[in-house]
Image (tube, rainbow, N blue to C red):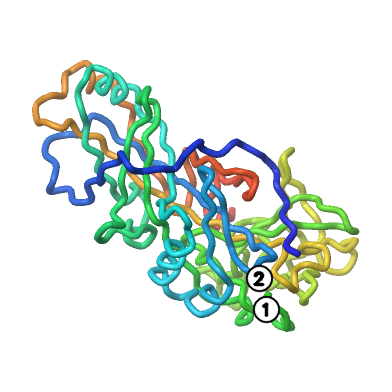
Amino acid sequence: MAILYVFFFPSGSASAKSSDAVPVLLDTTKVTGEPIAKKTSQQSLELWHYSGGYWGFTLGGIEYRIYDSAMKSNWNSADALVNELMRNNQFKEKVRFEFSVPENVKQYLKSGRNVKLLLKKADGSNIDLKQIFKTDGDAIPKYEFSKDYSTVYLYTWPKFKFNGLYGESVSGLTGRNNNIPKVHPTYGYNVYAIWKNGSSIGYAKGNSLYQRNDASNSVYYPQRKGDLAYEFIKDDIGRLKTEGGYDKILVFDKNGEKWYNIGSGSNDVRIGWYTFKDVGAVGIHLWYPVQLEFYPEKDGNITADLIAAAEPDIVLPPNQTQDIEVTLDSSASEAFLEGEQLHNWQ
């Protein structure tokens, strides 16, 4: 049975229907002049593994799934996985991300005028939109505003980027956990429910170890300080070991974070409690950084007061999060990502 550790329980959106939404603009040549406002934001999705043999999440009252068989066969094909997600959604509805609307855009819309939304790669990010969203044909992202114009809803089919399966990096795995996908560190991380002496204590996250560019010898480091790297996993039942001199991980709960020892003397800190072999207590967390630019529907309609009220653009460093606004329900844990950056070593 898959065990899920949950920290927050925000309510999901009432509906994720996109029948009234219109396609976003993806081509900068389709707009002229300056935008009314720009907004850079990094959204995130978290999928957990369920005992029914699938990875899934629920958003806006709609459940989305990717079955184990498809994950095992297509982990290296983002297009194949997004097609699987589309097939297993009973309402055939895109995933809905939510963004707050800049105040000057809100006032512009309340005055009876319309705007066009240009969706772009986030400033400071090396992740192109086509790498994280399906953008062709009927799958092009669409958007609409809430009735009070405080929120813009983006409907899209998200992609998933992995760089292997656990069986390639973790020795001694003989169970179903061989086929857990490894999240590419540019696009997110794996997440684990951590237990100690039979009780849940929080969650940890991580990718593989990496070698620093300035290292003169074979010294490897976690992607972020305190990560639970794949190389720390000892066996099928989720026990952990030290590697490369690292003997501690950061475990997060609703109150913050705490360091725990792993390996000998760890007092049995592990992934799940005898569930890891069947892919219990494991999730995948993925990032979706974007830039939204709001343009007047007709040229020449931007007034001086609206331009003056524009919010400053946010520059998002690579792999750092900002303005995480997506509403998740109890099938996913909240991400403690604010201010985080890969390879954050002094």
The residue identified by callout 2 is: 230
107 left or right of 84 in image: left
Callout 1: helix, strand or loop? loop
300 left or right of 259 in image: left
In the image, is residue 156 above or below residue 131? Answer: above
- What residue lies at 13% left-to-right and 46% top-to-bottom? 30
Q: Residues within 10 Å of mark 1 (few under 14, many from 20)?
A: some
Relative image position of residue 289 (x, y in whole percent): 41, 49
Q: Are marks 2 and 1 in contact (CB under 8 Å)?
A: yes
Q: Nearer the viewer, residue 239 or 276?
A: 276
| C-alpha gap between disc 2 and disc 1 | 6 Å
Relative image position of residue 338 (x, y in whole percent): 55, 42
Counting residues from the N terminus, which is met first, the one under dot 2 or under dot 1?
1
The residue type indicated by label 2 comes to Tyr
In the image, is residue 219 above or below residue 50? Answer: below
The residue type indicated by label 1 comes to Val
- What residue lies at 72% left-to-right and 61% top-to-bottom? 281
Q: Nearer the viewer, residue 137 or 315?
A: 137
Q: Residues within 10 Å of mark 2 (few under 14, many from 20)?
A: many
- What residue lies at 27% left-to-right and 38% top-to-bottom? 293
Q: Which numbered circle lies on residue 170? A: 1
Relative image position of residue 182 (x, y in whole percent): 57, 70
The answer to which quarter of the image holds residue 101 is top left
Relative image position of residue 104 (x, y in whole percent): 29, 22
Disc tally is 2
- What residue lies at 31% left-to-right and 57% top-to-bottom? 139
Q: Which numbered circle lies on residue 201? A: none
In the image, is residue 37 above or below residue 73? Answer: above
Q: Quadrant of the N terminus?
A: bottom right
